[in-house]
Image (tube, rainbow, N blue to C red):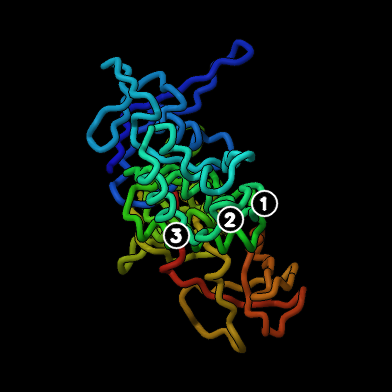
Amino acid sequence: MEIRIKGVSKYYYAEGKTIKALDDVNLVIPANHIFTLLGPSGCGKTTLLRCIVGLEMPDTGEISIGGDVVWSKAKNISVPPEKRGLGMVFQTYAIWPHMNVFDNVAYPLQVRNVPRDVIRQRVEKTLHFVQLEGFEKRPATKLSGGQQQRVALARALVAEPKVILFDEPLSNLDAKLREETRKELRAFLGKLQITAVYVTHDRVEALALSDSIAVMRAGKIIEVGTPKKIYFDADHRFVADFIGRANLVKATVRAEEGGFTIVDSGLGAITCQHRDVAIGSEATLCIRPEFIRIVRGEAAAASNLVNGRIETLVFVGEAYEAEIRVGDELLLAKIDPEAQLNEGDAVSFTLDPAHCLLVAI
């Protein structure tokens, strides 16, 4: 189901102050997409999720799910959460400690007074889907973190919702288990072909799971796009910086030439991918560390050839992380772990114009 959010604002009041948690949010979440709300703590992403599910009431605006209005201030419509046809997986899983796996998963059907034989069929089907067959009688609290996460997912799916919402469900897992569970979750949601709205502050989760990402800041939607668009071709400095490690350099637009935009910066004259920016205006040059290419041997004439000196060099397994000083600029670079380089070495590197991105200041 498609979700439409129009002009939604939400205010909190504390100690005589008004806090704007959501600021006139307008958003369309396509049907059958994995859609992620990404942003730092306090940006409003969980509040927006809770407004969709009906656990929070907005102060203005309208929310519709599958064409049906479930909240409207102007129309005085407020559909309760249990009638919105949604499933939800919470950050803490919210698993009942006194119930076994079967009863935890069956609970949403039991409160709807679904016949017992139908409940058993649906629970067995759902546990098979999340690969927890044979765990029906296991106490839920005796499961591993990853298994508990799958119980929470099964409970959200057993009522066959058209939309499922996730509030940072992997944040309590260790790094390796989080990576494994993320892959499983992507595979599960891909098979289901339902609308999933996923809240996280983890950029890797957002990039790995999503069909589309909305980056939020201070209660506003800053930018929406596919993971590749957000990572490689962001329009805003905040988005480019938040979605991944980035070198951000002040620049001034010099010219448009051959389908590229040329800027003056602390790295010298740099040719970038084209942007519709006025000549003479200021911008920010964004360069990802992995796109800094060290030149071996003599530095031949090349586009965007820059000379610098290595200030720090740290081995992190798959690469060296180096800080390269170029005048007043200090750039983070990822370098081949077999490179014969040391701190203090002079180096030359090139920057592919396709990966030199200009973003709004």
Give the vertical position of 213 relative to 78 (above or below).
Answer: below
Q: Residues within 10 Å of mark 2 (few under 14, many from 20)?
A: some
For mark 3, give the secondary structure. Answer: helix
> Please, what is the three-letter code of the amino acid marked with disc 3?
His
Q: Residue furthest bottom?
A: 297
Q: Nearer the viewer, residue 156 or 47?
A: 156
Q: Helix or strand or loop: what does disc 2 sit on? A: helix
Q: Quadrant of residue 51?
A: top left
**Which numbered disc, 2 or 3, marks the residue that appears first in the sequence?**
3
The residue identified by callout 2 is 147
The answer to whether 60 is drawn above or below residue 250 in the figure is above
Identify residue for label 1. Answer: 142
What amino acid is found at the position of numbered circle 2 in the picture? Gln
- Where does the image place residue 75, in percent across and percent down from the top left? 26, 16
Q: Marks 2 and 3, Cα distance to the nearest angstrom? A: 13 Å
337 left or right, relative to 126: right
**Mark 1 or mark 3: which comes first in sequence?**
3
Q: How many marks?
A: 3
Nearest to the eye among marks 2 and 1: give it: 1
Q: Is residue 67 visible?
A: yes
List x then y, in percent, for residue 243. 51, 53
Quarter of the picture containing the N terminus is top left
Q: Position of residue 107 (x, y in %)?
A: 48, 38
Query: Label 1 is placed on what type of residue?
Result: Lys
Residue in the picture at 56% in, 64% down: 180
Where residue 290 sits in the image (x, y, percent)? 55, 69
The residue that disc 3 covers is 128
**Residue at the location (59% across, 51% down)?**
148
Q: Earlier in the sequence, mark 2 or mark 1?
A: 1
Residue at 46%, 27% (x, y): give it. Answer: 55
